[in-house]
Image (cartoon, helix red, strand yellow):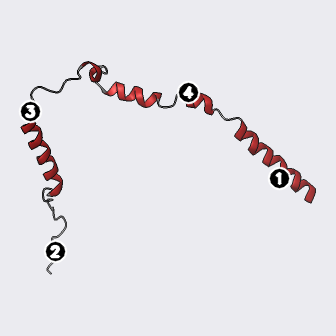
Amino acid sequence: MKRNTNLFGAALCLLILGGCAASGSPQWDAQFGDRVRSLNAQQLITPQAPTHNAQATPATDGRSAREAMSRHVESYRSPPPTTVINVGSIGTSR
């Protein structure tokens, strides 16, 4: 009985090690990131835009950009107050 258990354990270890040796990792590594790059390109209207339109937007000057950034930072310092909707308070006399 003990010998059968040892043989079963050895066979199980060999199967597990065989599964580790048969990895498809080189095939996966060759395509690593291709899906993410293709999805990012599909979300752009013009995928070549970053290379063709390298100049800054002419309508944005320093003053308006600074004011936009300061408004953006202030929106995180003092968020707008939340509106509380009190539902189900009918019948409480306290």
**Pointer 4 residue:** 30
Separation of residues labelled 3 and 1 (CA atoms): 73 Å
- Foreground mark, 2 or 3, reads 3
**Pointer 1 residue:** 9
Separation of residues labelled 2 and 1 (CA atoms): 69 Å
| Residue 37 pos. (x, y %) | 41, 28
Is 81 in front, or is 23? 23
Is 41 in front, or is 29? 29
Which quadrant would the C terminus be assigned to in this image? bottom left
**Pointer 2 residue:** 91
| Residue 36 pos. (x, y %) | 42, 31
Residue at horizontal 14 percent and vertical 58 percent from the top: 78
Label 2 secondary element: loop
Q: Which kind of residue does numbered mark 3 sit on?
A: Asp
Asked whether disc 3 touches disc 4, contact meaning CB atoms under 8 Å apart, the reply is no
Asked whether disc 2 touches disc 1, contact meaning CB atoms under 8 Å apart, the reply is no
Lower sequence index among marks 4 and 2: 4
| Residue 2 pos. (x, y %) | 91, 59
Lower sequence index among marks 1 and 4: 1
Q: Which kind of residue does numbered mark 2 sit on?
A: Gly
**Pointer 3 residue:** 61
Lower sequence index among marks 2 and 3: 3
Label 4 secondary element: helix
Q: Which kind of residue does numbered mark 1 sit on?
A: Gly
- Foreground mark, 2 or 1, reads 1
| Residue 90 pos. (x, y %) | 15, 70
Q: Could one spot residue 46 in this view of the protein?
A: no
- Foreground mark, 3 or 4, reads 3
Lower sequence index among marks 3 and 1: 1
Which quadrant would the N terminus be assigned to in this image? bottom right
Residue 19 sits in quarter: top right
Separation of residues labelled 1 and 4 (CA atoms): 36 Å
